[in-house]
Image: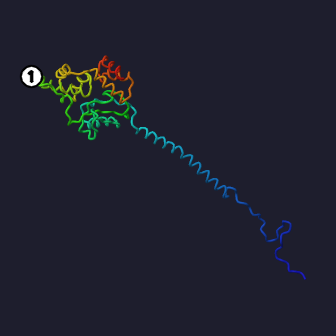
């Protein structure tokens, strides 16, 4: 018994039966395959990132430049003369120059300086005219406004008081006031003769040159002892060398002691 013939015949040895397509299936081009597309996307992102990197670098550089320009100037400042000012005025003057490290100390070493507006600057370290960076520490020695100067507390004999009273009548009032002020500067602040004169005629005291000269001619002070006291302040507070102390004592912008007075001070620092 024979089976009915199929309308289509199976291909034999690679031949196709009648009715079958003669075209072979073709593979996708490589540029359409997933791995090529993923690689292309990755390379594209890398190129975009590389192009944006210079802008980020420029932004960082600009930020650094801006920060540098906003930072405080490293240029040194020149200290003004603060002697005679109230504590708050002196503080404001220094802060206007960019100084932030300001130390107030009672010249007598007895009280804590709390409300600086109640105190008056009597000396400063470093001295006026000194050039230094704004981040340096400035020490202001102050006198409480309610205290009586030591010079006014000195007692005298009745005879001396009577003699002084009679002689004072012949001296102008301004001259007498200048002399009392000079005595305070000499006994409490240990200032030099030239330093006291300059202070008396400064805007802080505003005495006339004649009154200031009268005060200097009549004030009783041990100038060597004053120079030594100042030298010890510089040594204790600033650890300055002997030569630096000598220069500060004789400087025109410093204490203005004579060379002999400075030599005495330095030679007795170890006493």
The residue sitting at the right extreme is 1
Q: Position of residue 259 (x, y in %)?
A: 32, 17
Quarter assignment of residue 67:
top left
Quarter assignment of residue 35:
bottom right
Q: How is the image coloured?
A: rainbow
Residue found 38% across the figure and 28% down from its top? 239
Which residue is labeled 1 in the image? 166
> Dot 1: few (<14), some (14–19), or many (≥20) neighbours within 10 Å?
few
Q: Position of residue 173 (x, y in %)?
A: 12, 25
Q: Nearer the viewer, residue 155 or 78?
A: 155
Local secondary structure at mark 1: helix
Residue found 31% across the figure and 25% down from its top? 230
- Up-down: is 11 above or below 243? below
Q: Nearer the viewer, residue 35 or 266?
A: 266
Say left or right for 165 vs 260: left
- Up-down: is 257 above or below 126? above
Q: Position of residue 21 (x, y in %)?
A: 77, 68
Say left or right for 31 vs 171: right
């Amino acid at each position: 018994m024979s089976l009915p013939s199929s309308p289509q015949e199976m291909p034999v040895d690679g031949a196709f039966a009648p009715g079958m397509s003669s075209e072979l299936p073709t593979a996708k081009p490589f540029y359409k395959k997933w791995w090529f597309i993923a690689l292309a996307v990755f390379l594209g992102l890398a190129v975009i990132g590389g192009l944006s990197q210079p802008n980020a670098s420029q932004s960082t550089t600009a930020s650094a430049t801006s920060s540098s320009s906003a930072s405080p100037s490293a240029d040194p400042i020149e200290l003004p003369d603060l002697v005679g000012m109230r504590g708050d005025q002196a503080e404001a003057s220094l802060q206007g120059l960019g100084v932030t490290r300001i130390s107030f100390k009672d010249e007598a070493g007895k009280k804590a300086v709390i409300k600086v507006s109640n105190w008056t600057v009597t000396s400063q370290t470093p001295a006026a005219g000194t050039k230094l960076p704004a981040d340096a520490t400035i020490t202001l020695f102050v006198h409480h406004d309610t205290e009586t100067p030591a010079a006014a507390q000195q007692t005298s004999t009745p005879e001396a008081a009577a003699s002084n009273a009679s002689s004072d009548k012949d001296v102008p009032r301004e001259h007498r006031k200048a002399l009392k002020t000079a005595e305070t500067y000499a006994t409490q602040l240990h200032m030099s003769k030239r330093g006291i004169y300059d202070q008396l005629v400064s805007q802080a005291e505003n005495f006339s040159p004649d009154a200031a000269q009268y005060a200097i001619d009549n004030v009783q002070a041990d100038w060597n002892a004053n120079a030594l006291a100042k030298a010890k302040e510089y040594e204790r507070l600033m650890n300055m060398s002997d030569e630096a102390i000598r220069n500060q004592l004789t400087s025109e912008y410093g204490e203005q002691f004579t060379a002999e007075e400075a030599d005495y001070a330095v030679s007795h620092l170890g006493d």
